[in-house]
């Protein structure tokens, strides 16, 4: 009996989703998958600079620099990026959820959102530790300012709330401003969440 390579099967699924303009972030944010996501965003934008791109997020967070590369690419391209949190959007996952185009940021009813400040391992000489600490403090300030802009909260509120891990239900996260709507069905997401083809979307809009 022939066996199916799980990695090959995953690649097939992700490539099939990409044809529907859907990108899936389903793991920790790392340099490797950040490079892939940035490349996919640029590719989909080159194919059509006007159509929405869909970024689904189920992530515990991860590298700040890798996540900021994704964020910058989302801002760089002309397309609206629709973000959908399902399962968990923690730390950098939360930040990317909120980085979607305003009015097109969603979460499923049972999604959980976690906000906390950037962190990183610090070690080495006293000079190294000082430089690393200054970098973390700078990133904390930058991300607090961006999160305040995304949510409508004040920078002071963000800094106070992210000083420790702060968990939100989908309803609490919606009220806080992390996203714009709780969606139990793809039909309530812009463009059907990427699951509706163009003709189907046009037909639905006529009904």
Image (cartoon, helix red, strand yellow):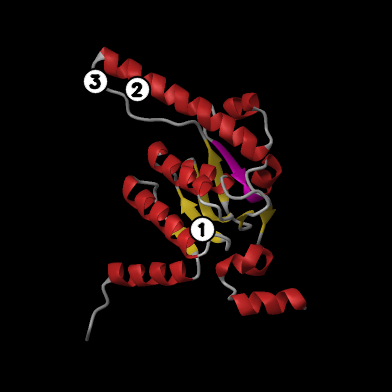
Q: Would you name the residue on which mark 3 appears?
A: 124
Q: Would you name the residue on which mark 1 appears?
A: 56
The one of 72 and 4 positioned closer to us in this rendering? 72
The one of 174 and 135 positioned closer to us in this rendering? 135
- Highlighted magenta segment, given as a residue range: 166-170
At horizontal 50% and vertical 46% (from top left) the residue drawn is 76
Say whether residue 167 is magenta. Answer: yes
At horizontal 67% and vertical 42% (from top left) the residue drawn is 177
31 vs 3: above or below: above
Q: Identify the mark nearer the N-term, 3 or 1.
A: 1
Residue 92: x, y in percent? 47, 42
Q: Residues within 10 Å of mark 3 (few under 14, many from 20)?
A: few
Q: Which-is-in-front pick, marks 3 and 2?
A: 2
Residue 32: x, y in percent? 32, 50
Residue 90: x, y in percent? 50, 44
Residue sitting at the far bottom:
1
Q: Residues within 10 Å of mark 2 (few under 14, many from 20)?
A: some
Q: Main secondary structure of the magenta part?
A: strand
Q: Secondary structure at mark 3?
A: loop
Q: Secondary structure at mark 2?
A: helix
């Amino acid at each position: 009996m022939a066996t199916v390579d799980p990695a090959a099967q995953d690649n097939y699924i992700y490539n099939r989703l990409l044809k529907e303009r859907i990108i899936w972030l389903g793991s920790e944010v790392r340099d490797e998958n950040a490079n892939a996501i940035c490349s996919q965003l640029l590719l989909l934008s080159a194919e059509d600079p006007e159509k929405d791109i869909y970024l689904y997020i189920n992530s515990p967070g991860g590298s700040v620099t890798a996540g900021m590369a994704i964020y910058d690419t989302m801002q760089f391209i002309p397309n609206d990026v629709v973000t959908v949190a399902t399962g968990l959007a923690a730390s950098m996952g939360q930040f990317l959820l909120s980085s979607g185009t305003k009015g097109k940021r969603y979460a499923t009813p049972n999604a959980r959102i976690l906000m906390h400040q950037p962190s990183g391992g610090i070690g080495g000489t006293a000079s190294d530790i000082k430089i690393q600490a200054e970098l973390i403090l700078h990133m904390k300030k930058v991300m607090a300012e961006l999160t305040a802009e995304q949510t409508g909260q004040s920078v002071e509120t963000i800094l106070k709330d992210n000083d420790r891990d702060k968990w939100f239900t989908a309803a609490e996260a919606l009220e806080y401003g992390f996203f714009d709507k709780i969606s139990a069905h793809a039909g309530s997401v812009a463009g059907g969440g990427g699951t509706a083809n163009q003709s189907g979307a046009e037909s639905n809009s006529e009904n």
